[in-house]
Amino acid sequence: MTVELRPMGWSDIDVVMRLETELFTNESWTESMFWSELGQPETRHYVVAIDGDEVIGYAGLCAYAPHEAYVQTIGVTTSRQGEGIGTRLLLDLIAEAERRGCPRLDLEVRADNDSAIALYQRYGFSQIGVRRGYYQPSGTDAVVMRRERAAT
């Protein structure tokens, strides 16, 4: 695999929006949401997965050290899913949350996304709640998951 991770920049927003629409259709983030996220580097960490010059995935973290961090988003183009790219993106976010000293990392995931839930469980996340009707306009529930940092 020739995939590398690098920080997401302003020039990546157009292609990330195409991926966002491909993956999440009418429940995708807006361009202004990504602009806002990238404009807060003190509490945000966004990366893209690239293969050559092509952006094939992205991920974002919100971290309020030393208290908590949140996985904001992870997405990998449909044609490249199952290659471990999502895992690499998740591990980057976990490492950044730990680097920032956050004792826990939370996320929401669609209740019907079994493969993502399994990935998160594999890396120490456990279910702590459900947000009924969280994803709109579908009304799909969100499973809330948390990963606690191991005591050192």
Image (tube, rainbow, N blue to C red):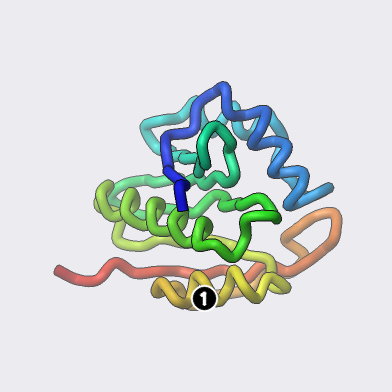
Give x and y (percent) for residue 120: 49, 70
Q: Residue at x 62, y 29 (%)?
A: 13
Q: How many marks?
A: 1
**Residue 139 or 119: which is nearer the viewer?**
119
Binning the other alpha carbons within 10 Å of mark 1 as few (below 14), some (14 to 19) or many (20 upward) gives: few
Report whether 97 appears left or right of 38: left
Residue at image mark 1: 128
Vertical relation: 56 (above or below) 39 = below
Instruction: Please state which of residues 85 and 47 is positioned toward the viewer in this rendering.
Output: 85
As rendered, which of 130 and 100 lies closer to the eye? 100
Residue 64 shown left or right of residue 56 in the figure: left
Q: Which image quarter is the C terminus in?
A: bottom left
Identified at 50% across, 44% down, the residue is 49
Q: Residue at x 64, y 36 (%)?
A: 16
Vertical order, 123 against 19 (above or below): below
Residue 48, x across and y down, in percent: 50, 40
Q: On the rendered structure, is 29 left or right of 49?
A: right
* Secondary structure state at the residue bearing disc 1: strand
Q: Residue at x 74, y 45 (%)?
A: 28
Q: Amino acid at mark 1?
A: Ile
